[in-house]
Image (cartoon, rainbow, N blue to C red):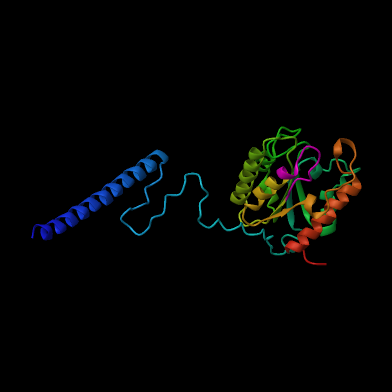
Amino acid sequence: MRRGHDFPLAALLIVLLALGVVGGTGYAWTQFNDRIAEDTDVESVVDPGGSDDRLPDAPGLPDASPSEPAEPAYEPPTFDTLTPTANRPRPVLLLLGDGWAAGDGASTEKASYAALLADDLGWDVRTVAESGAGYTVPGLGGSTILDMFAGAPLGSIDPDAVLVQAGYAGATDTKAVTRAIADLGEQIAADLPDTPVVAVSSFRPDGVKAKQEAKMTKAWRDLDGTLVLRPSKEGWADLPTGAAGNPLDAGHQTIATSLEQALRDSGLVPQS
């Protein structure tokens, strides 16, 4: 009879011992996991009593979540056509820019691309420009592009569209240039709401890198409703130039012709 009672007692002791080992192991594992989580600032994710026995991801591994969707491709805006009216027989274009917009390099004022645009389109082109001016660099008159816009007599000009043509002008701080572009775009939108804006990116003369031109382009594209033209990508940046790298008459003719086609494609100018 004693043997019959010894066996259940031994079995009971074995069961209790097993439970103690499992419980102790689970407690020790939890403490170990929590210590690792504390040391690595990663929340403990392992529950020894649960069905998920995954170890926590090692700190620094890339996030397994889906990557952000790619930025949508740039869609050039289209505009309403500028047509003559009884009160305004010639649509008014405000050309804001640097020395090229001012006609530097052209043999005469009539050979500048601003004058060629006016003659070819039958528009009234009002030019506000300074030689040597850039988005962050003042021109010969001491003004940046934003300064010139801020000082332009918008009330008397009353433009139907705005064309901006400028570059780095020797600047090296790309972030400052893109901030200045954003500021200019916002100021144009505030002062001339619903007015079409066309921006010409850098022609990439000496000293302007492709990445800088790309950053400038993106800054303009980030402004809703702005048509951005890229001479270096669209095949009209290779111009015959003369003194100080300014375009000769043929260069101004190329700029004018390219702008006219782009304005037609955008809808501002009727298709001929």
Instruction: Confirm whether residue 75 shows in the render.
Output: yes
**As rendered, which of 17 and 132 lies closer to the eye?**
17
**As rendered, which of 136 and 214 lies closer to the eye?**
214
Main secondary structure of the magenta stretch: loop
Q: Residue sitting at 35 percent across and 40 percent down? A: 35
Q: Residue sitting at 16 percent across and 58 percent down? A: 7
Residue placed furthest toward the left? 1
**Quadrant of residue 53 within the rendered picture:** bottom left
On screen, residue 122 versus residue 6, left or right, reads right
Instruction: Confirm whether residue 122 shows in the render.
Output: no
Considering only vertical position in the picture, is 75 above or below 221?
A: below
Residue 27, given in percent of the width and then of the height, sits at 28, 47
On screen, residue 99 versus residue 78, left or right, reads right
**As rendered, which of 224 and 39 lies closer to the eye?**
39
Considering only vertical position in the picture, is 224 above or below 141?
A: below
Residue 90, given in percent of the width and then of the height, sits at 77, 58
Give the magenta part as a residue range: 200-212
**As rendered, which of 106 and 69 lies closer to the eye?**
69
Per the image, is 250 magenta? no
Residue 37, given in percent of the width and then of the height, sits at 38, 43
Considering only vertical position in the picture, is 82 above or below 127?
A: below
Residue 156, given in percent of the width and then of the height, sits at 68, 48
Quarter that holds the N terminus: bottom left
Quarter that holds the C terminus: bottom right
